[in-house]
Image (cartoon, helix red, strand yellow):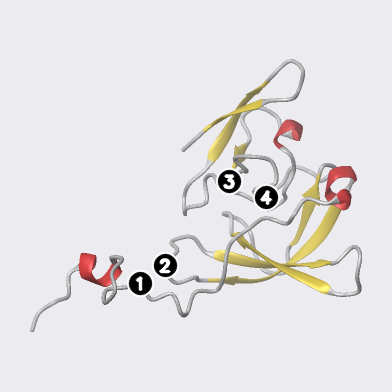
Amino acid sequence: MGRVIRGSRKGKSLIFSAKTRLRKGAVKLRAVDYAERHGFMKGLVKNIIHDPGRGAPMAEVVFHDPYHYKLCKERWVAVEGLHTGQFVYCGSKAQLSVGNVLPLGKMPEGTVISMCEDKAADRGRLARASGCSCMVVGHSDDGRKTRIRLP
């Protein structure tokens, strides 16, 4: 019969719909709370998985809940150099290294970043695709704004 064209396979329609049943879930950074604003939280990378319909690999990071006795599982876009069993740190007092999450104001100029927030607490909107990154260009004199170069 021949090949079904890509527009028919992936397009939005009643009969030609994308297969979303096997997708793993939404990719978001950890919600900013008191522990992240005034210190840091330690998480463990449990798994790096493939998400259908996404080009970049996805990392499952497990944190201890700071308020309840339970574990919280977050899904992030895995950056280059992230591996399973690695500890990652989130917060304003975290060190600048691969996989860690910290505010833009704490990063020096020239830092390559991914999964950057567009607005405060939107949990990551910019530079999420595979091979995609932003770069910190400069900070304002009062320290309230940071300029980044988009991909």
Q: CA distance from mark 4 to mark 3?
A: 11 Å
Mark whose residue sits in front, 4 or 1: 1
Q: Which residue is mark 3?
A: 114
Q: Which residue is mark 1?
A: 18
Check disc 1 and report its element: helix, strand or loop. Answer: loop
Q: CA distance from mark 3 to mark 1?
A: 27 Å
Q: CA distance from mark 2 to mark 4?
A: 25 Å
Mark whose residue sits in front, 3 or 1: 1
Q: Are the residues at dot 2 and dot 4 in contact (C-beta closer than 8 Å)?
A: no
Check disc 2 and report its element: helix, strand or loop. Answer: loop
Q: Which residue is mark 4?
A: 98
Lower position in the chain sequence, tag 2 or tag 4: 2
Mark whose residue sits in front, 2 or 1: 1
Dot 3: within a 10 Å radius of its alpha carbon, few (fewer than 14), some, or many (20 or more) residues?
many
At a point 47% along the width and 79% down the height, the residue shown is 22
* Residue 59, quarter of picture: bottom right
Check disc 4 and report its element: helix, strand or loop. Answer: loop
* Residue 3, quarter of picture: bottom left
Screen quadrant of the N terminus: bottom left
Q: Which residue is mark 2?
A: 53
Mark whose residue sits in front, 4 or 3: 3
